[in-house]
Image (spheres, rainbow, N blue to C red):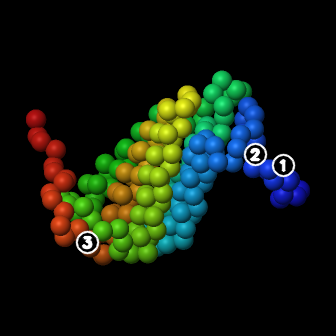
């Protein structure tokens, strides 16, 4: 199998249902998801420590789900032959993990600086690229119909990465550094 086909040499690429320019918003969106996936892989190189193996396994699951998101975006609406792959259950899993990791990490009131351990720093990079992917998807959905779960998943994923980075720092004994000019932006939910 050749890795090159020469079919994109004039700036077009194939997606499910046709061909588009390589700078099409659809390609930009799923290409940015691919960037997120690469940074998730990088973060995983620092998640082999005993205290972080649960994160490692979750990140591997997320890598597959990111391929699902990209696959869903690579389909021209109405041209898919199979159901979309990104589901509400995937989003619910992220929410469950966010809640668990938020409870495990030290209380937070202010914005924090991205960093700390190697693991947390790499996770923060994945988080910021996930936010960029989300912005691309928002632009795409203004032009065409997409699987709505992809946008929700990417929104929740960046929150998951924030919680995962904080818990990685906490487990490895590295304190998050608060942004020194931050107002109090995180408060505990009111008891009813």
Q: Quick check: 102 above or below 50? A: above
Query: Which mark is first along the chain, 2 or 1?
Result: 1
Q: CA distance from mark 1 to mark 3?
A: 49 Å
Q: Which residue lies under the disc numbered 1? A: 7
Quarter holding the C terminus is: top left
Question: Residue 51, how many percent across, how many down?
Answer: 40, 69
Query: Which mark is first along the chain, 3 or 1?
Result: 1
Q: CB atoms at circles 1 and 2 under 8 Å apart?
A: yes
Q: Which residue lies under the disc numbered 2? A: 12
Q: Which residue lies at the image location 41% right of the left edge and 64% below the top edge?
A: 124
Residue furthest out toward the front: 10
Tell me the number on the disc at residue 177.
3
Estimate how packed mark 3 is, as few (under 14), some (14 to 19) or many (20 or more) residues with alpha carbons within 10 Å.
Answer: few
Q: Which residue lies at the image location 58% right of the left edge and 61% below the top edge?
A: 38
Left or right of 180 on screen, residue 39: right
Left or right of 71 on screen, residue 151: left
Q: Which mark is nearer the camera, 3 or 2?
A: 2
Q: CB atoms at circles 3 and 2 under 8 Å apart?
A: no
Query: Which mark is first along the chain, 2 or 3?
Result: 2
Residue furthest out toward the top: 78
Question: Residue 76, how many percent across, how many down?
Answer: 66, 31
Mark 2: which secondary structure?
strand
Estimate how packed mark 2 is, as few (under 14), some (14 to 19) or many (20 or more) residues with alpha carbons within 10 Å.
Answer: some
Q: Which residue lies at the image location 54% right of the left edge and 71% below the top edge?
A: 45
């Amino acid at each position: 199998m050749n890795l090159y086909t020469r079919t994109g040499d004039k700036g077009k690429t194939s997606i499910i249902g046709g061909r588009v320019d390589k700078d099409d918003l659809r390609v930009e969106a799923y290409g940015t998801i691919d960037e997120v996936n690469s940074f998730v892989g990088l973060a995983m190189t620092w998640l082999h420590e005993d205290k972080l193996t649960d994160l490692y396994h979750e990140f591997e699951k997320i890598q597959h789900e990111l391929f699902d998101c990209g696959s869903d975006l690579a389909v021209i609406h109405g041209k898919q032959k199979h159901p979309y792959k990104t589901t509400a259950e995937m989003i619910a899993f992220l929410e469950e993990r966010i809640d668990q990791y938020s409870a495990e990490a030290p209380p937070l009131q202010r914005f924090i600086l991205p960093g700390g351990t190697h693991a947390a720093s790499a996770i923060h990079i994945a988080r910021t690229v996930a936010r960029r992917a989300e912005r691309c998807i928002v632009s795409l959905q203004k032009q065409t119909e997409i699987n709505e779960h992809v946008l929700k998943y990417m929104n929740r994923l960046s929150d998951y990465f924030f919680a995962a980075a904080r818990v990685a720092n906490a487990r490895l004994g590295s304190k998050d550094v608060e942004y020194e000019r931050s107002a109090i932006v995180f408060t505990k939910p009111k008891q009813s």
